[in-house]
Amino acid sequence: MLYYCIIGAVIALWLTGIVCRHIRGRRKMIRVIEDNCTGCTKCLKICRRNVLEAVKDENGTHIAVKNPYNCTACSNCVKACKFKALELYSLRNRKDD
């Protein structure tokens, strides 16, 4: 019986984590600060949700947001960037650029 309670608790915590990530992802969005981006692609390697992509143009390689609504606002890519080229911003306080 105790075994079933432990399994139930683990499943409940796992589902709670999924719901919290989904809610946080709807409140925040990732943005690339292009002046700081060097195109090193460390953020691409760490993003599990396929949100970012490398774009090559006349200015060289830089990162762009490909699928913004796949982002769960985990901030792993922000932590991976040494150049502070990525930031999470709140959709509630969003200013039109």
Image: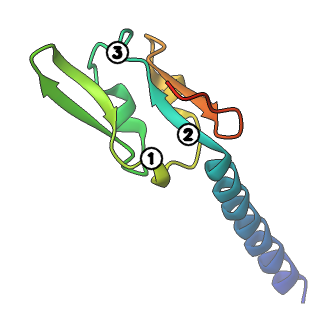
> Compared with residue 67, is residue 43 higher up or lower down, i.e. above or below?
above
- Report, in whole angstroms, how far the alpha carbon at label 3 lies from the one at label 1: 18 Å
Type of amino acid at the residue the image marks with label 1: Pro
Secondary structure beneath label 2: strand
Are discs 1 and 2 less than 8 Å apart at CB? Answer: yes
Secondary structure beneath label 3: loop
Where's residue 21, x and y in %?
A: 66, 54
As drawn, is 65 to the left or to the right of 76?
left
> Few, some or many C-alpha atoms within 10 Å of disc 3 (few <14, some 14-19, many ≥20)?
some
Type of amino acid at the residue the image marks with label 2: Met
Position of the N terminus by quadrant: bottom right
Residue 68, label in figure: 1
Q: Nearer the viewer, mark 3 or mark 2?
A: 2
Name the residue rendered at 77%, 70% in the picture: 10
Mark before the other along the chain sequence, 1 or 2: 2
- Report, in whole angstroms, how far the alpha carbon at label 3 lies from the one at label 2: 17 Å
**Picture quadrant where residue 14 is located:** bottom right
Mark before the other along the chain sequence, 3 or 2: 2
Reading the image, the residue beneath label 3 is 37
Type of amino acid at the residue the image marks with label 3: Cys
Residue 29, label in figure: 2
